[in-house]
Image (cartoon, helix red, strand yellow):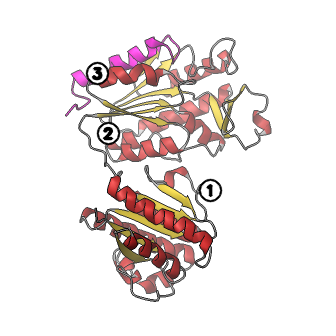
């Protein structure tokens, strides 16, 4: 049960706070390993991994960082070194989890360290900007844990001790309890939304499991797409059913509910077979606290709950989105099949419902026919109909039969 936790931070400015975390880990029977990522100052006592070790990991020196031309570039050097060392320490079996502390500088660096580790390694970030919209989805590791560091900008006090002690206990407990993912069966990665909007996940999951797959469904609300892309880039999936592309529409119009520029690129870069469809690509999702921009106030509107609400994409916007999808699919190194449901792309896109816009849907279909250059399968059904799921399964079965999808 003795686990080693890497503790990362700027020990020149947060020595007391970082050493407090180390003490809590030690008191709970764990072993802390300290890494200093300071540039200008020095810790009160030597750390297990010095700032000189950090820069040396990427062929630099601390003086190189000092002379780099600003704190941003200097900390990027430190981040590269810290991430390199973090990955090596885990690969060598020397650490079982990490925890990092910081404001914007420290958080920026520790996010890179978290992304350097595989899924299943506990990753905790105690940050004064945890959950802030300044942190984009594509900077987050799929299983990262963030804790808001109340009262933690400067100095150790009873308020921030509450956050730090919980975080130290959490990362050690996670390292003891974690069950890392094991691919005992080939994994299908699926993108979807809640079953009130997209129902195919409930229609597809059991048939996929009966075929010998494990099914992992990701929520297409920014964070889910980020996690999906990260695992796809790692080659974790045997195939993907990327059937909900609303995050790309959100990215196109500037909504914060997006997964970054790499969406719809991870599986393609890894050569993973993809079945793709524009589920919910007719809607723009906004955070519930946002005012709907004036340009979208005359559109079909759906308030899902207090966290998220949606407006519709007009016909030309849907054409632009399809062209963006086409360009991303053109980059794919593996097989891709694009499925276009001709009768609607989400539950509210039905005759008489709030998001139904037959003219805009017709423009989307027309653009798919002209712009998508991978094989297109037109399904004369709604995306939530059984016929659509049956068509997807038929394509996957064909790929399994000819060896395109590896069941090993």
Q: Which residue is mark 2?
A: 271
Q: Where's residue 251, x and y in %?
A: 59, 42
Q: Where's residue 12, x and y in %?
A: 51, 84
Name the mark nearer the viewer: 1 or 2: 1
Q: Which residue is mark 3?
A: 210
- For label 3, the SS is helix
Q: Which residues are magenta?
A: 379-408
Extreme residue in the left direction? 408
- For label 1, the SS is loop
Q: Quadrant of the N terminus?
A: bottom left
Residue 8's disc is none
Q: Which residue is mark 1?
A: 132
* Point 53% across, 31% down: residue: 193
Pointer 2 or 3: first along the chain: 3
Pointer 1 or 2: first along the chain: 1
Pointer 1 or 3: first along the chain: 1
Give me the C-alpha separation between circle 1 and circle 3: 41 Å
Q: Quadrant of the C terminus?
A: top left
């Amino acid at each position: 049960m003795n686990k080693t936790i890497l503790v990362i931070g700027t020990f020149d400015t947060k020595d007391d706070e970082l050493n407090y975390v180390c003490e809590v880990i030690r008191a709970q029977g764990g072993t802390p390993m300290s890494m200093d990522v300071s540039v200008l100052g020095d810790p009160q006592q030597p750390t297990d991994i010095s700032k000189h070790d950090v820069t040396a990991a990427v062929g630099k020196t601390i003086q190189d960082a000092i002379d780099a031309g600003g704190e941003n570039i200097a900390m990027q050097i430190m981040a590269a070194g810290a991430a390199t060392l973090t990955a090596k320490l885990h690969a060598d079996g020397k650490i079982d989890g990490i925890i990092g502390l910081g404001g914007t500088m420290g958080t920026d660096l520790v996010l890179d360290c978290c992304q350097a580790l595989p899924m299943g390694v506990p990753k905790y970030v105690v940050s004064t900007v945890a959950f802030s919209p300044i942190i984009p989805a594509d900077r987050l590791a799929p299983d990262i844990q963030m804790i808001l560091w109340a009262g933690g900008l400067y100095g150790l006090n009873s308020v921030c001790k509450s956050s730090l002690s919980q975080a130290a206990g959490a990362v050690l407990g996670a390292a003891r309890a974690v069950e890392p993912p094991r691919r005992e069966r080939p994994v299908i990665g699926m993108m979807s939304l809640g079953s009130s909007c997209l129902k195919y996940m409930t229609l597809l999951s059991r048939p996929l499991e009966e075929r010998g797959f494990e099914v992992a469904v990701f929520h297409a609300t920014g964070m889910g797409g980020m996690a999906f892309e990260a695992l796809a880039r790692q080659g974790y999936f045997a195939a993907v059913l990327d059937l909900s592309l609303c995050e790309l529409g959100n990215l196109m119009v500037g909504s914060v509910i997006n997964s970054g520029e790499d969406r719809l690129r991870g599986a393609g870069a890894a050569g993973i077979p993809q079945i793709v469809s524009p589920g919910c690509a007719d809607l723009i999702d906004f955070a519930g606290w946002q005012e709907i921009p004036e340009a979208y106030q005359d559109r079909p509107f759906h308030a899902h709950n207090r966290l998220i609400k949606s407006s519709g994409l007009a016909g030309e916007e849907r054409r632009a989105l399809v062209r963006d999808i086409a360009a991303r699919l053109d980059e794919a190194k593996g097989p891709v099949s694009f499925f276009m449901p001709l009768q609607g792309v989400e539950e509210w896109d039905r005759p008489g419902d709030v998001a139904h816009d037959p003219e805009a849907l017709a423009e989307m279909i027309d653009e798919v026919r002209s712009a998508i250059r991978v094989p297109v399968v037109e399904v004369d059904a709604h995306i939530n109909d059984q016929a659509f799921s049956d068509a997807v399964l038929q394509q996957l079965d064909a790929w399994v039969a000819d060896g395109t999808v590896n069941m090993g």
